[in-house]
Structures are given as structure tokens and as C-alpha cells.
Amino acid sequence: MRCHLACCICFVATASASQLTAALLLCLQILTHMKEKLQYVEKENSSLETGLTDLDTSMIAQRDSLTQLKATRDALRTKGRTIKASSVYVTSAPLLADLEVGGGRCCVPMRMKETGHEMTLE
């Protein structure tokens, strides 16, 4: 630090006024450029932070939605397992759905009557 200060004092003592003004002007230009660049970077950083905040809120909402969907899926899996376990002989999906709707018993009594080659409901 002392050496640098001594060099500056030596430069000031030996330099002319035009050299000093040129050096000061160069330092001022460098400082102005650095200040403008800092302002630009801060502005860009703030815009990126707002984008990051938006992405974070979106991600949190999607995680919550995923958790709800997984809970619904697990509930449906459990319901399917209980239906499958309760119906030993029924393996058809439409029959299982009818059993679930009717509570295990037929809701509407139906009789099939064979007439020739076609079947009709009575």
C-alpha cells in the first residue's frame, strides 16, 4: 500500500497537468462504466428473481395437485382390491361395476326369454 501511494505521489510530482487530467478522465470513465454495469446486473437479477418466485409458486401448486392425485389413485386402488376380493367368481369388469352399484344384489329383476335365435328382456 505504501509503495503504491509512493508511486502515485511520484507520478503526480513528475506528471504534467494534461497527463493528470487524462488519467482522471480514464478513471472516471471506468468507474461510470462499472456503475452502469452494476445497475444493469441488479435489474436483470431482480427480473430473474421474480421469475424464480413465479416458478416456485407454480411448482408448489403442482406438488399439491400431485399429492391429491396420488391420494385419489391409492383410494381407487384400495377400492378395486376390496371389490376384487369380495367377488370370488365374478371376473368381468362390467359385472363388477353392476355389483358395486347394486350393493351386491340385482336392482331390477330381469328374465330372459329365448325366442328363436334372439334373446329378449321381459
Image (cartoon, rainbow, N blue to C red):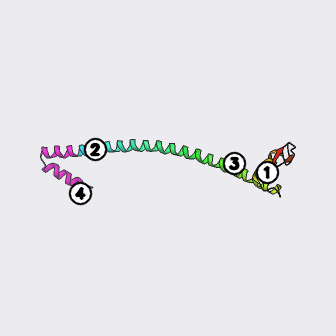
Q: Nearer the viewer, mark 2 or mark 3?
A: 3
**Residue tagged by mark 1?**
95
* Residue 63: mark in rendering: none
Give the quadrant of residue 35: top left
Disc with the residue nearer the chain's start (1 vs 4): 4
Furthest residue toward front:
116
**How crowded is the residue under tag 3: few (<14 C-alpha within 10 Å), some, or many (20+)?**
few
Pointer 2 local density, CA inside 10 Å: few below 14, some 14–19, many at least 20: few
Residue type highlighted by circle 4: Cys
Q: CA separation, marks 1 and 4?
A: 96 Å
- Look at mark 3 in the image and give the residue it sits on: 72
Q: Is residue 101 toward the left or the right of residue 34 in the image?
A: right
Q: Is residue 15 magenta?
A: yes
Amino acid type, mark 1: Leu
Closest to the observer, 6 or 114: 114
> x, y (%) of residue 89?
83, 58
Q: Main secondary structure of the magenta part?
A: helix
The residue lying at 51 percent from left, 45 percent from top is 55
Please identify, in this view, whether the residue under mark 1 or under mark 3 is nearer the observer: 1
Q: Which residue is mark 4?
A: 3
Q: Earlier in the sequence, mark 1 or mark 2?
A: 2
Going by the numbered disc 2, the residue's amino acid type is: His
Report the magenta residues as a range: 2-26
Q: CA distance from mark 2 to mark 3?
A: 58 Å
Residue at (12%, 50%) from the top-left corner? Answer: 14
Q: Which residue is mark 2?
A: 33
